């Protein structure tokens, strides 16, 4: 009978997961799944209990992730299965379990909206830019601040085809550490009048205790999309009153995140119904296989 062991973010600490992983012995014919939030071992052969299939299907569909519906786990399950195939001779039932799990993950993401919408500040900022129908390949984008959030945004912008991206920061050393590997030019923050004159999209996320950009810093009739991810705000509210400026602040971004999370949660029931259908299909396939083997003997 196929079984599984799982420790994850819901039942153990990060330290406990690390200790479990380092002390884990993977047996012949087993599949080890390791992600940032879980370590799971699927082992054995023969019958596949419904609860085992249900758990793996839920994991692959993103229902057990810290962020419901996240996509990365689908690829992680696929990689774990492929690595196990290279190392061991897996049972036919194990093959069928994992191939079905990957189909379930694909079906859930195709037939529901569980993976739709950004659920992080960085991705929500990118989503807002796309909503405004901005051509990233032609836009001059300036980011203010050096931290994990702006690093993620830079990565996402590059992946979306942005080519004219610039970084401004008080500390030039920190700015160059982030910008140089990406081939991004750096501005000093006190040169804001210079870089704002040429900026089409402004994204700011610093830890400054007061506003850094005011309405008087923006040239007259300048068109600008500004996204302020800082608290307290980096971009003064006066910027949003200018005629050709559209300003989103942290409240706007977090509202978008909340709406997207709500949509994902509402899709869980639909995803669970698909999983139950697929469990029944898996059991039917395995039942017919056993009958065929008995008849052949």
Image (cartoon, grey):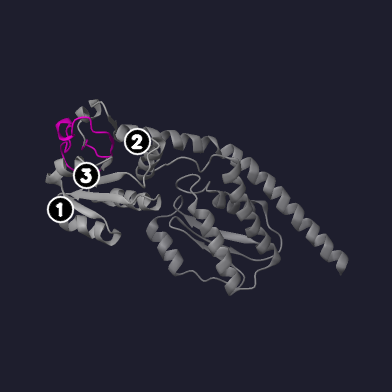
- In the rendering, at what x and y percent does residue 193 appear? 14, 40
> In the depicted view, which residue is nearer to us: 164 or 71?
164
Secondary structure of residue under mark 3? loop
Q: Which residue is mark 3?
A: 206
Which residue shows up at 68% across the image and 49% down it?
A: 279
Please state the total of marks drawn on the protein image: 3
Asked whether the residues under the numbered discs 1 and 3 touch, taking CB atoms below 8 Å apart as contact, a structural biologist would say: no
Q: Which residue is mark 2?
A: 253
Using residue 188 as the reference point, say whether residue 146 is left or right of it. Answer: right
Quadrant in the rendering for residue 21: bottom left
Check if residue 219 falls in the magenta segment. yes
Q: Which residue is mark 1?
A: 171
Which is the main secondary structure of the residues drawn in magenta? loop
Using residue 93 as the reference point, say whether residue 119 is left or right of it. Answer: left
- In the rendering, at what x and y percent does residue 143 appear? 25, 46
Q: CA distance from mark 1 to mark 2?
A: 26 Å
Mark 1 or mark 3: name the one nearer the start of the chain: 1
Q: Which residues are magenta?
A: 205-234
């Amino acid at each position: 009978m196929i079984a599984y062991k799982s420790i994850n973010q819901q039942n153990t600490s990060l330290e406990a997961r690390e200790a479990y992983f380092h002390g884990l012995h993977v047996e012949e014919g087993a599949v080890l799944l390791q992600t940032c939030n879980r370590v799971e071992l699927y082992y054995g052969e023969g019958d596949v209990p419904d609860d085992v299939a249900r758990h793996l299907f839920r994991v692959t569909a993103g229902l057990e992730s810290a962020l419901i519906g996240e996509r990365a786990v689908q690829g992680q399950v696929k990689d774990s299965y492929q690595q196990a195939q290279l190392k061991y001779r897996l049972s036919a039932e194990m093959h069928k379990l994992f191939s079905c799990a990957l189909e379930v993950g694909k079906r859930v993401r195709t037939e529901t909206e569980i993976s739709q919408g950004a659920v992080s500040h960085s991705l929500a900022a990118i989503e807002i830019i796309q909503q405004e129908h901005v051509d990233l390949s032609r836009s001059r984008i300036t980011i203010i601040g050096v931290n994990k959030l702006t690093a993620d945004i830079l990565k996402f912008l590059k992946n979306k085809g942005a080519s004219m991206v610039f970084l401004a920061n008080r500390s030039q050393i920190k700015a160059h550490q982030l910008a140089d590997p990406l081939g991004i030019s750096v501005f000093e923050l006190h040169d804001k009048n210079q870089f704002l004159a040429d900026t089409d999209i402004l994204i700011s996320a610093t830890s400054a205790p007061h506003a850094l950009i005011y309405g008087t810093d923006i040239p007259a009739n300048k068109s600008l999309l500004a996204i302020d991810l800082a608290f307290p705000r980096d971009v003064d509210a006066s910027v949003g009153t200018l005629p050709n400026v559209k300003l989103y602040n942290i409240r706007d971004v977090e509202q978008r995140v909340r709406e997207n999370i709500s949509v994902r949660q509402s899709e869980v029931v639909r995803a669970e119904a698909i999983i139950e259908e697929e469990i029944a299909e898996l059991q039917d396939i395995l039942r017919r296989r056993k009958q065929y083997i008995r008849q052949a003997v």
